[in-house]
Amino acid sequence: MRMLAYGITADFCDDYLDIAKSTAIEILEHFITAIWNVYHETYLRRPTPADLRRLLEKAAERGFPGMVGSLDCSLNDINILGCSPLFNDVCLGETAEVNYQVCNRHYRQCYYLVDGIDPKWGSFVQAIRNPRMPQTQHFTRMQEAYRKDVERAFGILQARWAIIRGPARGWSKENLQYIMMTCIILHNMIVEDKHDEDAAEPFDPDDISTRPKKAEIYDRPIIPTNVHRNPHQLNQFLRRHREVRCPVMNKNLQDVLVDHLWTMKLQAD
């Protein structure tokens, strides 16, 4: 834990544990492997409906209803996106469906905030390059400000686990993966301890059944996903795949969010 939290070297353990450097590294390897094997299904799981609802509510308060996160990468974003399984479950229909409303328009696909290098997909919302109108300038400021949250979250992870911000060349790729996953799992344990999901939700006086909800979340029906032999399932897979990558949806959603954020600003002023 000292090596993870404080980033101390393995030979530093000689002073108070009387163990060799190689033994300290071996102990760390056993520890991070055990943490992964025991806890990854619990603390690296998909978001539950309660998690998703909390994310959507926070995003709606900032003017981005239907937004579930922001994406950023210190490497080449296009290469990472090409290797990422992020949208596999969406295309297979294994994620919870979400219905939300923006400017009296209904949508059922969540989206992420990204930078300009990412493709114009229906599941992405970029900032506007060189905005000229006050509406587009305000939208770009809000989008860029919210997208910085992913960098702040990683900064918190680095501050809590110093081994992440230390040199990495001394570790094998396998150990680096286990170290990163262990730090994320332990971080999620701390977050869960501070936010008890099983606690009863407080009563919201504005939650009136006659008013439209900000977002409705419900599980998809369990349907076999063997798309190779079932034409109907194959068509559904292709439809969801096109929706994720639809450039028309990208432009439409961006325009609607520009109007929505500008309306919120005028109301606040």
Image: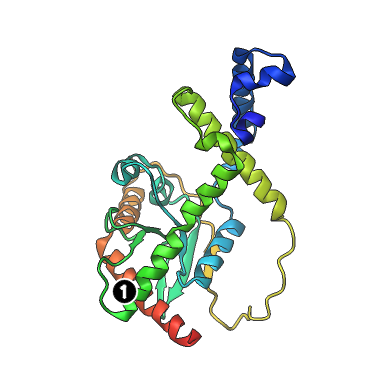
Out of 188 and 21, give the one closest to the viewer: 21
Determine the image quadrant of residue 88.
top left
Identify the secondary structure beneath mark 1. helix
**Residue 158: x %, y % from top left:** 54, 43
Q: Is residue 249 visible?
A: no
Which residue bears the numbered disc 1?
255
The residue lying at 62 percent from left, 80 percent from top is: 209
Location of residue 257 in the rendering, given as x and y in whole percent from the top left corner: 38, 73
User: Residue 233, how many percent across, how many down?
Assistant: 36, 49
Residue 28, picture quadrant: top right
* Image quadrant where residue 101 sits: bottom left
Q: Left or right of 6: which side holds 178?
A: left
Vertical side of 139 occupied by 40: above or below: above
Q: Nearer the viewer, residue 15 or 117?
A: 15
Residue shown at 57% from the left, 63% from the top: 53
User: Where 240 sits versus 25, above or below?
Assistant: below
Residue 221 position in % (x across, y down): 51, 54
Residue at image position (48%, 63%) is 98
Residue type, numbered disc 1: Asp
Residue 83 at least partly seen:
yes
Q: Residue furthest front?
A: 15
* Left-right relation of 85 to 250: right
Please name the residue shown 52% across and 48% down the image: 155
Q: Residues within 10 Å of mark 1 (few under 14, many from 20)?
A: some
Q: Nearer the viewer, residue 206 or 208?
A: 206
